[in-house]
Amino acid sequence: MTWNESNLNEPQLIDIPIAHDQRGNLSVVEGGELVPFDIKRVYYLYDVPGGTTRGGHAHRNLRQLIIAASGSFDVILDDGKKRTKYSLNRSYHGLYIPTMHWREIENFSSGAVCMVLASEHYDASDYIYEYDEFKKIVNEM
């Protein structure tokens, strides 16, 4: 994928290359190559109880790549105008999330692992937890 100003601000499904091998497949994600940022933090969600929704926030500066490392789940993204649902269920697909997109993650399968590659270290001031505040900010942009 070639990154430029026109696609940096839009969520996108990214195919992660697979090196096929009879001993097992290998996929590699490198910051600045497959994703348009240096990876500064990696975290993952697992053992999520059925019916639970994670996320429920937006980021002012943080960009992310979300991968279903195991199992499946849905990511709902909202840019302030429309909501789009992405179903992630393969470890060789990732969802690029730019800044200022409200996200919710739901419908976790049993044993699902949601891995997140982030462009920034944790910063509490980067989070927007109130949807009405998010809507106000994006409508002023």
Image (cartoon, rainbow, N blue to C red):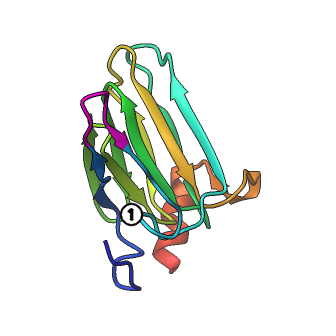
* Residue 12 figure quarter: bottom left
Which one is nearer the viewer's eye here, 29 or 42?
29
**Foreground residue, 71 or 58?**
71
What residue range appears in magenta?
A: 20-26
User: Considering only vertical position in the picture, is 95 above or below 105?
Assistant: below
- Judge by depth and name the residue closer to the eye, 77 or 29: 29
- The spot of residue 102 in percent (x, y) is 46, 54
Residue at far front of view: 22
- Percent from the top left, x then y, of residue 125? 75, 57
The residue at 50%/59% (across/down) is: 30
Q: According to the image, label 1 marks what residue?
A: 79
53 inside magenta stretch: no
Q: Residue at x 38, y 63 (%)?
A: 79
Q: Quadrant of the N terminus?
A: bottom left
Q: Is residue 72 visible?
A: yes
Magenta stretch, main secondary structure, is loop
Nearer to me, 42 or 131:
42
- Dot 1 falls on a residue whose secondary structure is loop
Please give the name of the residue rendered at 58% of the width and 49% of the height, measured from the top-left corner.
Answer: 130
Tell me which amino acid carries mark 1: Asp
Please state the horizontal and vertical placement of residue 131, each as a whole percent of the image: 51, 51
> In the picture shown, does residue 124 fall above or below 63?
above
Residue 23 located within the stretch drawn in magenta: yes
**Residue 96 sits in quarter:** bottom left
Task: Tell me the residue at 45%/54% (across/down).
Answer: 29
Q: Is residue 120 above or below residue 4?
A: above
Q: Is residue 35 above or below residue 103?
A: below
Q: Relative to 22, is 75 on the left or the right?
A: right
Residue 57 visible to the viewer: no
Q: Quadrant of residue 120?
A: bottom right
